[in-house]
Image: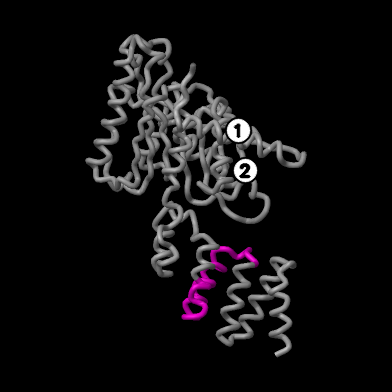
Amino acid sequence: MIKINKLTKVILALLMSLQCFAFAQESTPYSIGKTYKIHSNILNENRSYIVELPDSYGKGEKEYPLLVLLDGEVNYHSHSGIIKHMTQSRQIPEMIIVAIVNVDRVRDFTPTKYLVNLNGSSAVENHKTSGGSAKFLSFIEQELLPTIEKKYRTNAFRTLVGISHGGLLVGSSFLSENTSFNGFVSMDPSFWWDDQFIVKKLKNTELKQIENKRIYVSTADKFENFDRIPHVFKANINSHERFNTELKNKGVSPGNVDLEYFKEENHWTVALLSLYKGMQFIFKDLKMKNIRNSSLEEIEAYYKTNYNSGFTPPENDINAIGYRFIKSDLKKALAFFKLNVKNYPKSSNAYDSLGEAYFLLGKKKEALESYKKSLELDSRNDNARKMIEKISRG
């Protein structure tokens, strides 16, 4: 009998719930990502990538965080399913997914020319193209991402996800001073590569270069399928531990680093669990703790200094804080409602709340303008219509 651990059961349940959800809906066209091609002058070749837009993308002018997924032809469908469930259950924000299809992953994901396998045997043939990750990262940063930015509405927060050699590339990007990524999910990465090259590079990296980035590293720790060489995989675990220790020695905030062991998983089964837990970790601070008891200045400062200023305070929370003050301090309430209008200019409710604050302050002209804007954004807003009539009658 195959034993399935608790977290694996959770992931399976999530995927099954997505399937059940689909069957429960009325019959509608189902759209997933589309494949595009780009010519890379840096790599001197054509590359393919898959783009999947959030469900709400066509419903407004919102900007979205970007997730770039490596090994796209293998990982796209399963990984996008996990991301979709997590966004639907509001664990993470909606995001644009870009999955890069491979041409030569050994070449593109490895930082040095290295002709030795993990177990110490010769890899002259398998690794003959190795050492091209600097070029590949340049392709992502200088060619692919600018193309995505021109075509789609993206915000300032970007996450890079990869496993094995892909996880090694994630580590290289994390340490790069030229990266535009802010979040990194490195799943059972090949940090053993070239006598732990990535760990040595970390030792020579200045704290200011990495202190504001968030990185999640997972480790698989079950070797029943590799009984002949468990010591070899232990060597990879050692590289993960040394990487984590070096980050702590550098003084990186514990809140920005997570190394997680999956003792019941192996290198082939750890991916989806790592993605799920990794994305939870990356976005764990998206909502400010105790936001409803914080000042306007504290809230604005928090969202300016976290996630590369890519997100704004949640509209519903700010609205609730405003109404908490509406009976005790109208000027404070007005300030919170103004913040919502600034951050959510397409929200009818934000303007409706602002109109109420202005009306209670006796500023009827400003109240009328706010209610008119609210009704313009949502013609079904009967409260705005009634208030417009009331203020117009004098």
Which residue is found at the position 45% from the left and 52% from the top? 286
- Most prominent secondary structure in the magenta stretch? helix
Name the amino acid type tagged 2: Leu
Image label count: 2
Task: Say few, some or many: other residues with alpha carbon within 10 Å of mark 1 (under 14 / 14 to 19 / 20 or more).
Answer: few
User: Is 308 one of the magenta-colored residues?
Assistant: no
| Identity of the residue furthest to the front in this view | 1
Label 2 belongs to which residue? Answer: 53
SS assignment at label 1? helix
User: Is 331 one of the magenta-colored residues?
Assistant: yes
Name the residue nearer the viewer: 46 or 287: 287
Name the amino acid type tagged 1: Met
Q: Is residue 202 left or right of residue 299?
A: left
Which residue is found at the position 62% from the left and 71% from the top? 351
| Residue 364 drawn above or below residue 383 | below
| Residue 149 drawn above or below residue 82 | below
Q: Is residue 322 left or right of residue 187?
A: right
| Residue 274 drawn above or below residue 114 | below
Residue 32 in sight from this viewpoint: yes
Q: Bounds of the magenta span?
A: 322-348
- Give the x, y percent position of residue 223: 37, 17
Label 1 belongs to which residue? Answer: 16
Name the residue nearer the viewer: 252 or 15: 15
Name the residue nearer the viewer: 263 or 334: 263
- Give the x, y percent position of residue 232: 31, 16
Which residue is found at the position 45% from the left and 65% from the top? 292
Q: Mark 2, mark 1: which one is toward the viewer?
A: 1
